Image (tube, rainbow, N blue to C red):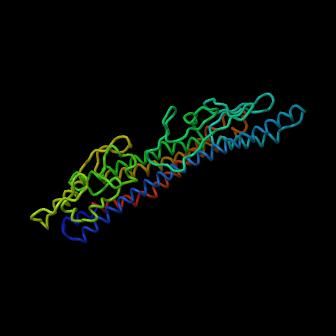
Amino acid sequence: GDSFRALSTTPNSSSAQSVALTRADETARSLNQLSNTVQSLRTDADASIERSVSAVNSTLKKIQDINLEIGRLRVNGQSSADLEDKRDVLVDSLSKEIDISYFTRETGEIWIMTKSGRALLDTSVHTLQYSAKPAVDPSMRYVAPPGPSGFNGIVIDGVDVTGDIGGGRIAGYVGLRDNLLVQAQDQLDEMADGLINAFSSKGLVLFFDGTAAYNPVNKIGLAQRIAVNQNVVVAPRALRHGTNAAGVVNPIPVPDPVGDATLPLAIVASFETQRTFAAAPGLATVATLEGYANAFITFQGTQRANIGDQLENQSLITNSMDQRVRNDSGVNVDQELARLIQLQSSYSASARIISAVKDMFDALMRVA
């Protein structure tokens, strides 16, 4: 980065101070934007769970209707082949939404259950229930009963079965909302924490958590809230004189060493210093701030590439199995297809994160 390096050569320059503050603001806003992207994706995933649940219920009802008609045709000694073909299409559609098993009864009806054995269709439809949240924030997590949980559970017959659903769109969206995207937010929060500490450890609270000095116990969602300390914006001399721990600009010393570049140089050195990061987000625990940002970009890019490779391989597997699946009436048709759908959802989300990463990194590298 260049802004504080330039400031260190002319620490009293209002122009250099203005550039440094602009770069800091760009960095904070880039982290805000990327965090907002992650939470928007989580909101989308949560809404998609509700849509998939609705699709499952609708499809189960259609299969039930066909079951009843097939039963009537069989009793009258008539062929039900056409209806069975239509039902197969519906079962295929259902398996894209949720991982299922099924078996055909002597009457020609099929009974369907989840992979974990929870009944979806027998003598009646066992309706799934789910209500999405209108908006998602970084603190929200799904917690199985008894909770408390930031999200509703997916319920069948009064039982929360969220953790039992292992495939299809529903499992893919749950995994996005609760795992992949939560990890991305944790990584961004860790980066924001490191950025704040790179300055505050040298006596300059350049960044606030919203409108107040940052407290590390509030790290969750920090990247969404990080902002330039307005006390410094109002009094740019703070880039020379520093602030106290609360972010209030220090008094002008007497005498005032106009050309003193001690603070800007210390901040440049801070960016080049190895620091410790939390292990939970899955990146390096010891790195420079730039190194951690690079690790984040590499992680997200590698994850997207790996998902892309898995998606391609899974497509080949699914296509090669398709005919065999259609020929075996008792086979669990869901497994490979459901896995394919999960990967498609993850790949799409990873692509949106990657598209927002470059601006964040460029802004970060300009600030120091």
Residue 327 in the image, given as x and y percentages of width and height: 73, 37
Q: Residue at x 54, y 47 (%)?
A: 133
Q: Is residue 336 left or right of residue 269?
A: right
Quadrant containing the C terminus is bottom left
Is residue 142 shown to the viewer in this render? yes
Residue 147 lies, with reference to residue 235, above or below; the image says: above
In-front residue for pair 104/18: 18
Does residue 308 appear in the picture of this structure?
Answer: no
Q: Quadrant of the N terminus?
A: bottom left
Name the foreground residue: 254 vs 188: 254
Tell me residue 242's x, y (percent): 20, 58
* Residue at x-position 40% and y-position 59%: 358
Point out the residue furthest to the top here. 106
> Where does the image place residue 333, in percent across and percent down from the top left?
66, 37
Picture quadrant of residue 236: bottom left
**Residue in view at x 38 percent, y 60 percent:** 29
In the rendered view, does 57 fall on the left or right side of 357? right
> For this rendering, which residue is in front, 354 or 176?
176
Q: Is residue 126 left or right of residue 154?
A: right
Q: Position of residue 105 (x, y in %)?
A: 77, 29
Image point 57% across, 41% down: which residue?
171
